[in-house]
């Protein structure tokens, strides 16, 4: 085999290893061997990898003398790093750049240094040298060595990318596990322990404590729980906080986190004026991370993460965001549990008060036995009810308060009656009276009133004795109606949704668990339905949260009318509802309920003066086909619901295992989208806007597409919602704006005529305070005149924040930019807005153009007439047929775009077709 064939064989082998093996060390070893075999006169091949501190550490196994090199001391290394080019020194005695110590110690006559880089990113260096006999390298040999080194760079880049992707997936899974685990916690201790567990994984420290709202002191935040595995002893922690009594009123760090509701990280507490140094010294703290616990915009407390000793600590932005997300997941559970704890404290206080009162009353009864002349006075003025019984259980006396509570006009009406007129036999047994050794006891029960109604009471039975003989009993009682009502309200709030009064997630989980156990015992089936309202966010954004709340109440009422009595409807939170349907035979039983629900959404919802049509997406899981536990059935129904959301408008899906895989694919797609901009995977396509009257090109709309390296071209419908949810839409929108402006400027420079470039703006972009500055800077950078740029805004965006939106629109229009309302007619805005807006164009939504029924035709005519009356341009989107073209032209709407004229084209194809 020739040298050339051997060389190609080595390169092919290394290429195959890069694409089939994940072991970076093995690839680098093969690169070292290949270079050594290629350059036989070479004595040593060293690979040095770049470290975080800027030094280069030797990788090769034969490195001995100099296992680290530093650019500041080695001029040759410094030059290779700066130029990113290979440097060959055939005679070291005539060149001062190499490290003289290495040259002398290893008798180096010649050497070659090359950078390991990929896409201008440096990963390390490769150095070849002889042992006294010059290598005399040819240009061909140097190029071959560079090829091997480039293979090493690709392997390192692939390894880094894989490690980063795996880390992102691991973080997503950890957050999903934390959210699921925290949602099932039923006590504060359990919730905090679970939160500490996941925070320890993210932040790599176990010294964590939590400060929560004191249920008694209202807004006061107090130290509550220290992590079990903390390096700080619990007794030291408790003692230190007791002595210091730290809270947001006297601690600068806690106060800042409390007011800003943002985390603070202090790497060295002794170089920052804010921390309480007394606590830091007592506990031996080095760094301090304080994170807020926020629920519904309210402070619940703070979580403190610390390191001890001299250990240097730093957290990445990703770690801090992930930690805060875990805390946010715990906040909702903690808010509910703190509310419950507060109510329990109130009940305990009131029960303690009643017990104390009863003890006082028992003392009064004892005095009554000794001071008979004061008996009547005390009985008449006691606030609680009191009556006496003889050994035959007949009433011997009663005080006015007792008679009044029992509905009698005077206490005399009760004298001589049997105790059965007040309470049942089981509540006071005869044996209790006859047993002289019996002691006083406290019970709860119901007393009968004169009108045969009942009242809940707490009563104390005490024995009247004389010389060890039981003479009778004294019963003191208190009306506890208010306490019972309070207890009932607390229980209701714990298990029912405040807005819709439907069972909440906690109650559904409890009842569904019981239903699964029953179904398992009886070998029956049951179904779980998970519902989500389509486009509910637009109602909140455009009409306001009060309208959104009313809509949720109306939806709850309609769903309640569909669900049979033996099933349960629950609000899970937000715009999500869940139903469990027991005793089903087959899928047809489930579909009967599904059809009832879909039919109930066929009529509009009336919200004040607004008539709203809503639709819902439904996911269904079956026991035991799709799971045998509450958690799994709810999760799978939720997954199926997201599958239904892919098809808008009252669609439903039963769960399948393929959906679970698709959920993971969605997460992976989200991770890939984070890198799409960095790796130049986004591309712009351009759709022409034609004046049908003149048959001339008037303008063009820029449309973004994602050319995924594995999945190919991905449509905006698939990745734009992900970008909106993650906030990436802001960066993507700025990129689209910049590239679109560059393109029209390039076409102008080439002499191509084009009046305008239209670019869509998202709601997220308009929420940025610096949108005007961004647009202005892009125009200045590209040197594009503003009148060539048309910005398109959705109708709902205009009413979301009228004042802010209008100010930004006026600034953009004042710059000379034309503004258009996109998808006009699909939102909820008032037509009164239009006359006050600085817009030049209305775009008729494709839904009105594509379905030219009589109703849609009437709407389209109205929009065109409205635009003409307001002296606005009007463009019809989605034009696909000649019938649509002729209809629009007949209404004096000549500006059109759609597949009838052209699909969106790449820039080169657009030039070929129109220029």
Image (cartoon, helix red, strand yellow):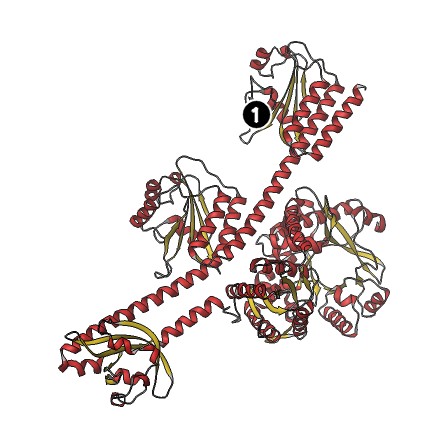
Residue 473, relative to residue 331: is it above or below?
Answer: below
Image height check: is 800 above or below 605? above
Horizontal and vertical percent for residue 133? Answer: 67, 9
| Residue ID at (60%, 52%) | 727
Q: In the figure, is residue 366 to the left or right of 656?
A: left
Residue pictured at 28% horizontal, 76% vertical: 431
Q: Nearer the viewer, residue 40 or 106?
A: 40
Task: Determine the image quadrant of residue 74.
Answer: top right
Relative height, residue 101 to residue 220 (above, below): above
Whether residue 807 is visible: no
Q: Is residue 515 above or below residue 175?
A: below
Q: Nearer the viewer, residue 702 or 868?
A: 702
Q: Mark 1: few, some, or many residues within 10 Å (few <14, many ≥20)?
A: some
Q: Which residue bears the numbered disc 1?
A: 57
Q: Where's residue 686, x and y in %?
A: 77, 52
What is the secondary structure assignment of the residue under circle 1?
Answer: strand
881 relative position to 544: left or right: right
């Amino acid at each position: 085999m020739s040298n050339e064939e051997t060389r190609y064989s080595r390169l092919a082998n290394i290429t195959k290893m890069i694409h089939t093996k994940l072991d970076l060390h093995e690839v680098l070893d093969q690169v070292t061997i290949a270079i050594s075999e290629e350059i036989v006169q070479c004595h040593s091949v060293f690979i040095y990898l770049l470290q975080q501190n800027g030094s280069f550490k030797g990788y090769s196994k034969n490195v001995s003398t100099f296992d680290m090199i530093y650019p500041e001391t080695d001029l040759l290394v410094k030059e290779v790093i700066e130029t990113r080019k290979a440097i060959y020194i055939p005679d070291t005695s005539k060149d001062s750049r190499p490290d003289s110590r290495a040259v002398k110690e290893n008798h180096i006559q010649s050497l070659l240094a090359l950078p390991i880089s990929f896409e201008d990113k440096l990963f390390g260096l490769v150095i070849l040298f002889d042992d006294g006999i010059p290598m005399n390298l040819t240009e061909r040999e140097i190029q071959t060595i560079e090829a091997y080194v480039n293979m090493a760079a690709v392997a390192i880049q692939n390894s880094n990318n894989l490690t980063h992707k795996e880390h992102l997936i691991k973080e997503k899974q950890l957050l999903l596990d934390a959210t699921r685990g925290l949602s099932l916690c039923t006590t504060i201790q359990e919730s905090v322990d679970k939160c500490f567990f996941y925070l320890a994984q993210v932040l790599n420290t176990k010294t964590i404590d939590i400060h929560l709202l004191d249920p008694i002191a209202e807004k006061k935040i107090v130290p509550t729980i220290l992590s079990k595995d903390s390096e700080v002893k619990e007794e030291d922690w408790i003692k230190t906080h007791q002595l210091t009594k730290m809270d947001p009123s006297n601690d600068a760090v806690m106060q800042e986190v409390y007011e800003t509701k943002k985390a603070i990280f202090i790497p060295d507490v002794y170089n920052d004026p804010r921390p309480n140094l007394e606590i830091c010294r007592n506990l031996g703290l080095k760094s301090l991370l304080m994170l807020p616990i926020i629920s519904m915009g309210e402070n619940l407390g703070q979580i403190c993460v610390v390191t001890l000793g001299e250990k240097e600590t730093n957290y990445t932005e990703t770690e801090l965001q992930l930690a805060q997300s875990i805390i946010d997941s715990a906040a909702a559970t903690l808010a509910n549990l703190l509310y419950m704890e507060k109510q329990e404290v109130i009940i305990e206080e009131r029960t303690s008060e009643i017990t104390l009162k009863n003890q006082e009353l028992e003392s009064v009864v004892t005095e009554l036995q000794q001071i008979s002349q004061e008996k009547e006075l005390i009985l008449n003025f006691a606030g609680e009810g009191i009556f006496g019984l003889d050994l035959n259980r007949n009433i011997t006396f009663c005080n006015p308060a007792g008679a009044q509570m029992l509905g009698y006009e005077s206490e005399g009406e009760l004298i001589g009656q049997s105790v059965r007129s007040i309470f049942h036999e089981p509540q006071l047994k005869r044996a209790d009276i006859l047993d002289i050794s019996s002691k006083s006891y406290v019970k709860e029960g119901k007393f009968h009133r004169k009108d045969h109604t009942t009242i809940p009471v707490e009563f104390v039975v005490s024995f009247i004795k004389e010389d060890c003989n039981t003479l009778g009993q004294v019963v003191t009682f208190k009306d506890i109606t208010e306490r019972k009502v309070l207890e009932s309200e607390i229980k209701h709030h714990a298990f029912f949704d405040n807005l819709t009064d439907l069972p909440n997630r906690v109650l559904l989980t409890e009842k569904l668990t019981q239903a699964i156990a029953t179904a398992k015992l009886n070998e029956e089936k049951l179904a779980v339905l998970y519902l989500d309202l389509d486009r509910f966010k637009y109602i909140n954004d455009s009409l306001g949260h009060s309208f959104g709340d009313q809509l949720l109440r109306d939806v709850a009422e309609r769903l309640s009318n569909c669900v049979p009595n033996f099933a349960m409807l629950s609000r899970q939170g937000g715009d999500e509802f869940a139903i469990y349907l027991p005793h089903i035979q087959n899928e047809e039983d489930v579909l009967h309920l599904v059809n009832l629900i879909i039919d109930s959404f066929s009529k509009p919802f009336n919200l004040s003066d607004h008539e709203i049509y809503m639709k819902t997406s439904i996911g269904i899981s079956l026991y035991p086909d799709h799971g045998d536990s509450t958690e799994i059935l709810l999760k799978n129904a939720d997954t199926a619901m997201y599958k239904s959301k892919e098809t808008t408008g009252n669609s439903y899906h039963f769960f399948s295992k393929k959906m679970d895989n698709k959920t993971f694919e969605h997460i992976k797609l989200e991770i890939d989208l984070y890198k799409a901009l960095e790796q130049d995977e986004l591309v712009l396509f351009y759709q022409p806007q034609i004046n049908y009257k003149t048959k001339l090109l008037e303008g063009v709309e820029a449309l973004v597409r994602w050319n995924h390296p594995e999945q190919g071209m991905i449509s905006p419908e698939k990745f734009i919602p992900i970008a909106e949810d993650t906030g990436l839409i802001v960066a993507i929108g700025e990129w689209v704006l910049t590239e679109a402006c560059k393109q029209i400027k390039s076409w102008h420079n080439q002499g191509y005529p084009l009046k305008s470039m239209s670019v869509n703006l998202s709601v997220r972009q308009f929420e940025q305070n610096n949108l005007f500055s961004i647009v202005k800077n892009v125009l200045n950078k590209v040197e594009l005149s503003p009148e060539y740029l048309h910005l398109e805004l959705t109708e709902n965006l205009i009413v979301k924040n009228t004042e802010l939106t209008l100010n930004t629109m006026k600034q953009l229009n004042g710059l000379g930019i034309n503004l258009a309302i996109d998808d006009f007619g699909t939102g909820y805005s008032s037509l009164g807005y239009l006359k006050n807006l600085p817009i030049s164009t209305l775009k008729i939504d494709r839904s009105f153009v594509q379905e030219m029924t009589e109703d849609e035709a009437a709407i389209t005519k109205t929009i065109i007439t409205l635009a003409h009356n307001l002296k606005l341009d009007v463009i019809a989107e989605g034009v696909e047929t000649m019938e649509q073209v002729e209809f629009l032209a007949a209404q004096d709407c000549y500006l059109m775009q759609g597949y009838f004229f052209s699909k969106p084209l790449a820039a080169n194809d657009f030039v070929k077709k129109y220029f």
